[in-house]
Image (spheres, helix red, strand yellow):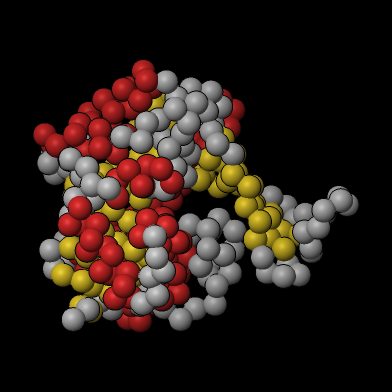
Amino acid sequence: MNDILTVTLNPALDLSTSTDRVVAGPKLRCDAMSVDPGGGGINVARVVAELGGRARAFVALAGPSGMRLEESLAQLGLPLVRMKAPGETRESFAVHDRSTGEQFRFVLPGPVWSEADVAESLHAIATAVPQGGIVVLSGSQPPGVPLEFPTELCRALKARGAYVIADTSGEALTYLAAGTDPAPAVLRMDSAEAEELAGRPLVSRRESAEFAAELVARGAAERVILARGADGSVMAGPEGLTQVSAAKVSVLSAVGAGDSFVGAFAYGLASGMSAPDALALGAAAASSTVTTPGTQLCTGDHVRELLAQCGASFIA
C-alpha cells in the first residue's frame, strides 16, 4: 500500500452535544459533551485507519487546545507529523436540536499564520513524504496562508512524484478551479461550491460531470470530483465521466461525510483500486458517516455493507 500523509493546517478540537430545543434567550440544558479531534485531514486519516490502512497526519498544533487534540489523536493511535502552529488551536462546537433533528455548527477561524510559518510547513511536509506517496490536503486554510498554498505544495512535492488530493474551500478552491501549474492530481468539491464556480445550476449528474470535465480541461486537476449529496458523486478524468450512487440510509448528521469520502477514496487508490472503484468506496464511506451522530465517522464494516449500493458506472 502506498504511503498516505494527510495535511491539516487548521485543526480543531470538536465539541458536540444535544439539547431538547435550540432557542435564543434561556439557558439551554445540554447533554454531556463529546470531544473529538477535528479538521479535514485528521478525519481523513481516521477513516483510512478504520478501513484497515495506515495514514500519518501532519497537524499544526499549539496551546492547551492543541495539547488536548494531540492527546485525542494519541488515543486513536494515529501517527503524527507535528508542527508548532502560531497561537491557539481553535475549537468548534456543534449542537443537535432533538425537537427538529437540526444541527447547529459554530466554527472559529484559527490562528493567523506568517510567511515563515507557511514556509516551515511546506518544508516539513515535503520532508515527510516518501517517493510516490499520496498527500491529502483537506480542510480550510488558516488566516494568513495564501491562496497559492496548494500550488506551492504541489511544487514542493513534484520531485517526490507525490499524488496530491486537494479538498479545500472558499477562495483557495476558486483559485485552484481556474487552473494552476502544477495542479493537484485530484480536486474535490461539493455541489454548492461547483454551482457557484459554474455560475449556473447543475441539476443532473451529467451536468455536474460535464462541468467537472471543464475544470479538468482548464488544468484544475487530472481528476475532478463533484459530490452531489444524496444523489452520489461524479468524476471527470482520464477514464471519462464516472458516476456513483449514495447508499439509501437515514441521515443523522452530515459532519465528516466529505472527509470520509476523501479518506476512503485515498485508501482505495493506495491499496491499488482503480479511480472509479475508489470513488464508489468513497461514496459508501460518506453514506455510512451520515448515519452516525455528532462528529462520529463511518465504520469499516458498515462501509463494506453499503458498497454494493454505490457501484461506479460511466456516463455515456
Residue 21: % across, % down: 79, 63
Where is residue 180? Give x, y as percent. 22, 42
Report the label total: 0
Q: Residue at x 42, y 20 (%)?
A: 114
On screen, 291 above or below 84? below
Residue 86, x across and y down, in percent = 48, 22
Query: Is residue 268 among what the camera can see?
Result: no
Would you say 59 lies left or right of 5 here?
A: right
The quarter of the image holding the C terminus is: bottom left
Residue at 59% across, 44% down? 107
Q: Is residue 25 above or below residue 301?
A: above
**In-front residue for pair 133/242:** 242
Observer able to see residue 142: yes
| Residue at image coords 53%, 23% | 87
Q: Residue at x 21, y 38 (%)?
A: 154
Q: Relative to the observer, which residue lies in front, 70 or 44? A: 44
Q: Residue furthest front?
A: 199
Residue that extends furthest to the top in the rendered view of this protein = 116
Residue 250 sits in quarter:
bottom right
Please tell me which residue lies in front, 190 or 199. 199
